[in-house]
Image (tube, rainbow, N blue to C red):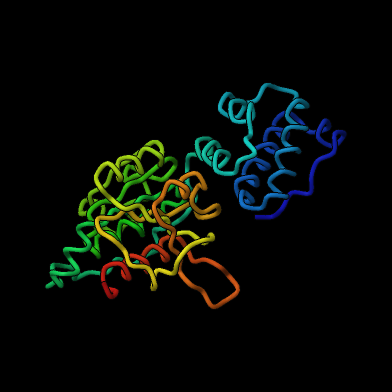
């Protein structure tokens, strides 16, 4: 996204009411784009709060409600922004669907392990990533996929394009809050593992996973909410050798699940 240059008071007051509204919406979109950049995030919040009272006309109700409070905590802010920007803009219909899929002879030991695994998605934003999670959960016969908070659900118009026909083959549940999902998992006797790049954590290749378990994966820009991480029983990570310290959430989830199911145990 092209970064805005900022608006002075005089410049903003010279805008028409329609142009002012477009400018505010642009800043809101930019705020979500830079959600993980603390300095830029704070700059944008300050600019929005400075400009909003200067608008010539009353803002739309949903935008006005959003701007009444812009939380400093990025996870809370992301959830508020997602409620406002409730349509994803990802285009996932360019994927060729493989044909010839069908039942294969599976390793009974691996199947038994997979049946004791639940994946918990903590406020994912991208329907593409959630669709990919459905696909990997189906491929690995994962017991359930739990979608939490702003995570898109199968009723999203683009979900089936990204899940590639796997939605009906995966057991899933929706939780309004990830805390509730963790509570439910622990009530069912699951060990909760956070897949996150924080310290202290242990490599997935060194950790001995105990079943049944729930693997918690987090938002693309912010990772797992720290409050959720604290409630998990263990934290695991994928070791990297390059400059970036993490992978795309659906890719990372796939690697972790394959290791849990097919790794030495």
Residue in the picture at 68% in, 49% down: 38
Q: Quadrant of the N terminus?
A: bottom right
Q: Position of residue 241 (x, y in %)?
A: 54, 78
Q: Is residue 80 above or below residue 211?
A: above
To which quarter of the image does residue 54 belong?
top right
Q: Quadrant of the C terminus?
A: bottom left
Q: Is residue 27 left or right of residue 63?
A: right
Q: Is residue 30 above or below residue 258?
A: above
Q: Is residue 86 left or right of residue 34?
A: left
Q: Is residue 108 left or right of residue 219?
A: left
Residue 216 appears in view: yes
Q: Residue furthest top?
A: 58
Q: Position of residue 133 (x, y in %)?
A: 35, 58
Q: Position of residue 201 (x, y in %)?
A: 48, 62
Residue in the picture at 28% in, 53% down: 118
Residue in the picture at 39% in, 58% down: 93
Counting every numbered tag in the picture gives 0
Residue 128 appears in view: no
Q: Residue furthest bottom?
A: 241
To which quarter of the image does residue 55 belong?
top right
Q: Position of residue 132 (x, y in %)?
A: 36, 59
Nearer the observer, 216 or 157: 216
Q: Is residue 257 left or right of residue 17?
A: left
């Amino acid at each position: 996204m092209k970064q805005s240059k900022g608006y002075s008071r005089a410049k903003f007051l010279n805008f028409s009411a329609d142009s002012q509204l477009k400018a505010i919406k642009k800043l809101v979109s930019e705020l979500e784009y830079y959600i993980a950049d603390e300095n830029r995030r704070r700059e944008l919040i300050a600019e929005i709060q400075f400009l909003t009272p200067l608008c010539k006309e009353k803002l739309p109700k949903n935008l006005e409600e959003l701007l009444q409070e812009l939380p400093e905590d990025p996870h809370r802010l992301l959830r508020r922004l997602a409620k406002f920007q409730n349509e994803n803009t990802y285009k996932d219909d360019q994927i060729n669907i493989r044909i010839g899929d069908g039942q294969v002879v599976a390793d009974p030991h691996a199947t038994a392990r997979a049946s004791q695994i639940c994946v918990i998605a903590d406020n994912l934003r991208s329907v593409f990533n959630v669709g990919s999670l459905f696909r990997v959960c189906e491929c690995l016969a994962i017991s359930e996929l739990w979608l939490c908070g702003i995570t898109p659900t199968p009723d999203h118009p683009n979900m089936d394009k990204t899940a590639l026909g796997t939605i009906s083959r995966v057991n899933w549940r929706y939780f309004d809050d990830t805390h509730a999902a963790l509570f439910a998992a622990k009530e069912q006797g699951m060990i909760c593992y956070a897949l996150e790049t924080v310290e202290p954590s242990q490599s997935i290749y060194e950790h001995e996973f105990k079943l049944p378990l729930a693997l918690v994966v987090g938002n693309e820009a912010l990772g797992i909410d720290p409050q959720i991480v604290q409630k998990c029983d263990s934290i695991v990570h994928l070791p990297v050798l390059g400059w970036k310290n993490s992978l795309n959430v659906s890719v990372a989830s796939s690697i972790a699940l394959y290791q849990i199911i097919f790794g030495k145990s």
